[in-house]
Each structure stands twice: as C-alpha cells, then as structure tokens.
Amino acid sequence: MRRLIVLVVCLAMLLGLAATTGSAAAAKTKLVWQVHWSDFQVEGVYSGEGANRKLVSKGLRQYVEEYMKLHPDVEIEIQSVPMEEYLQKVLVARSSGVAPDLYGVYSLWGVQLTQNGILDTPPDAVVKDVRGNYTPVSVAGTTIGGKIWGIPMEVGNYCLVYNKELLKAKGFNAPPKTWSELVDMASKLTVRDKSGVITQYGFAFLAGWESAVVHPYLGLLWDLGGDFLSPDFRKCVVNSPEGVQALEAELQLFKTGGTDPAGSVWSFPQGKVAMMIMASWYEQSLKQGLGDKYDKVVGVAPVPYIKKPVNAGYTWFLAVDSASKNKKAAWDFLMWFSADVQKPKSTTRLGDLMVETIGGLPCREIDLANHPDTLNDLYTRTFVEQLKNSRPEPNVAQGAEVKTILANEIVEAWHGRKSAKQALDDAAIKINEILSEFY
C-alpha cells in the first residue's frame, strides 16, 4: 500500500511538471523575421576551422540569440529570402495568411506595402526616436506619404571611385571636381588597341539593373535643379530642359570617347577602368580583387557636379507586419536592436551589424560617429561625408517599374538609338500612364 501511495505521488509530480513546462512553452511569443541577407550576414563571420573556428564578427543570428537569452519568453525565427524574390514573397505570404512579423524593407517597396495595408504604424516612441537620432536622408527614405513607417536600417549613396595609378600615369594628381573635368579626363585616360577597341576605359557607367542606371542620373538631374516627378507624383517631369541636359551630360562621355556601352565597372580591379560612379557597398569586392594593391590604387571623391554637388540616396528600413499577433513584442525587439546604446563603443547592435559585418552605412547618427576605424577608412570616409549632399529617391507607387522604364530609356540614349530628348519624352509618356492609375 505504501508503495502504491509513493507511485501515485510521483506520477502526480511528473504530470504537474509536464503541465508547467507545456504552459511555459505555450506562453512563448514567437516572432518570424524575413531577411534578404546572405549567409555570412546572418550567421556571422568566422576564422579558422574545426576546433580553431572562431567568431570574428557577429551576424544577425548572434544578436537574435542574445535577445532570446535576455527574454526567454520570446522566440525569434530568421527566414532568409533572396533579395530579388523578397517583395513577391511578402505579398504572397500576406495573401496566404502566413506572413512574418518583421521585415527589412527597401524604401521603394514600402509604398506598395503601405498602400496594401501590410505595414504596421510604428508606435509614437519609435517615430520620436527616428526623428531625433537618424540622418536626414535616411529619415526621408523611411517616410512615405508624409509618415514614418519604420526604423532606418541602411542608407546607400554614390561617389566617384578612381584608379590613382592610372590618373597619375596620365599626369593627373587629383580626381575631377566638375562634370566637364570628368569628361575631359575620361577621354584622355581611355586607351584603344589598333582596331579601335577600348582596352582601358577612362570612365565606366554602373549598369545591369534599374537603380544602377537611374541613381547617378538622378544625381545629375537634381544637381541641375530639375526633378523626376511632380511633388504630388501625378506627372513625370524628367523630360524638362534640366532632365535633357543631365542625360546629354552623360552622353558627352560617349561622344568624346571616354566610354562606350561595353564598359563595365566590374573591370576596375583589373586596372581596365580609370573612373566610375559607384555605391558604398563595393569596398569588399575591391579589396578582394586588388589584394595588397588596394591602398595604392583606390581613390574616392565626391561625384563631379555641374552646378552643385548632389548624389542620389536610397534606404532600407525595419518594419512590422500590421497583421502580426505580436506587434508590441516585435517593436520592443526592434528598439532593443536599433536604439539600445552599448558600452564602451556607444553604438547600437544594428549599427555594429551594419558596419562590422554587412559593410553598409548605418543610419543612426551615433553609429556613424562611433565606428571611426571602419567608417573613416580610405573608401567609406567620403561616402559618409557625402551623406550631407545625398537626396533620397522618391518613394512613389510602382517605383521599381517606373525606374525600370527610365533606366531602359537612358540605356537607349547611351547606345545612340535615341536622342536624350526622345528617350526622356518616351519615358515620361510610359511613366505617366502608370502614375495615372495611382495618383
């Protein structure tokens, strides 16, 4: 009888423990974060192998694990999606009712996501923090329809990247400051073989996707005082006199022999390109391509201007799905990740991830100021300085489609198949058809 009583008591204790454990598991708040980052950006950077393998730079996962350790009632799952599939995945997941809780959104996608009611309105504390602590260009990039929709995550802009050795060999001791100097130097730095084929480009345009073509052009357009769209987004005004002048300025590089449509910025590490307008994310590729020659070869300067220095900027921001069942937990996590200042560097975790692992420009002022070793280096310093002259691309509905139309028409002009005026007139007609559906 005594044995039976002991057995019953033990069973009751086990059942009680199981019930308690099950209750705790059921009480956990689960967040799903969909990211477009590559493996090392999520998993971190390691050195060595086997037993000697050591974490050199934290990826997103290490920060998520830190948060879950501090908040054992929260579970965060990271889902990686290729950037080219990201927007479509979000839209499909939303329509099927299995959307994630957290996003990293390209600002141009944000327009479609807000119009479809997919993004949650940030709490007042988040908006106040963004307005008070982030660079103006990144705040503007996160603003859609006059309203801030998330926390700026990464900002990008453009500078002139040049080969110091090639310029010096031609007697140039400094990069061009104005567009006319750029055109003149590009033609003198171009080398052709006996058949007339260019073997060394004085200048090469970034190309291959819509932003690559459009962003540098927008910089020139704004430099001249023109604009891409009317303030109410009802009309494309890119075919204005300033717009035509900006595209004709690009065409001068082709007409004077400083480049041709076959020129590729990816040939810069091979010493086949003297100058290019490039984004801030290209540093690691240059270091890998040039090896120990990197410091001797690479120079960075502001984009040469016609009237005033302006360069186009773009933004990614963190956002929460409006249908999330755990919106407060999601915003709490994002604020811990992006606004909690860490000692002794006085930086945020998001800033550290951007600068130390991803290689992007952080958006929070304190992160720009307190990563001196990385952000003041040979390549990045000028990009940071030029944030003051960066203007965000317009957050317009169907932005990717609109930009693709403009990019295709610019390329038509590069190839000489259309004049600058004809190309921009054609772009304006097509873009106005799209805008009329939304504005």
Image (spheres, rainbow, N blue to C red):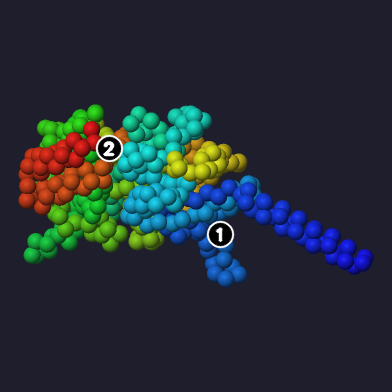
Q: Quadrant of the C terminus?
A: top left
Q: Which disc number belongs to residue 55?
A: 1
Which residue, as the protein is rendered here, is positioned at the far bottom? 50
Alpha carbon distance from label 2 to label 1: 41 Å
Residue lying at 23% horizontally and 55% vertically, measured from the top left: 208
* For discs 2 and 1, the disc positioned in front in the rendered view: 2
Residue lying at 26% horizontally and 46% vertically, measured from the top left: 400
On the image, the x and y values in percent for residue 280 come to: 35, 47
On the image, the x and y values in percent for residue 438 come to: 24, 36
- Asked which quadrant contains residue 3, the reply is bottom right
Left or right side of 207 for 362: right
Residue 350 at least partly seen:
yes
Q: Residues within 10 Å of mark 2 (few under 14, many from 20)?
A: many
Q: Is residue 95 above or below residue 421?
A: below
On the image, the x and y values in percent for residue 74 come to: 59, 48
The residue pinned by badge 2 equals 396
Q: Residues within 10 Å of mark 1 (few under 14, many from 20)?
A: some
The first of marks 2 and 1 along the sequence is: 1
On the image, the x and y values in percent for residue 392 come to: 31, 36
Left or right side of 332 for 111: left
Q: Amino acid at mark 1?
A: Leu
Q: Amino acid at mark 2?
A: Val
Q: In this view of the protein, which residue sits in the foreground, 271 or 432? A: 432
Which residue, as the protein is rendered here, is positioned at the far right? 2
What element does badge 2 sit on?
loop
Q: In this view of the protein, which residue sits in the foreground, 140 or 117? A: 117
Left or right side of 328 for 169: left
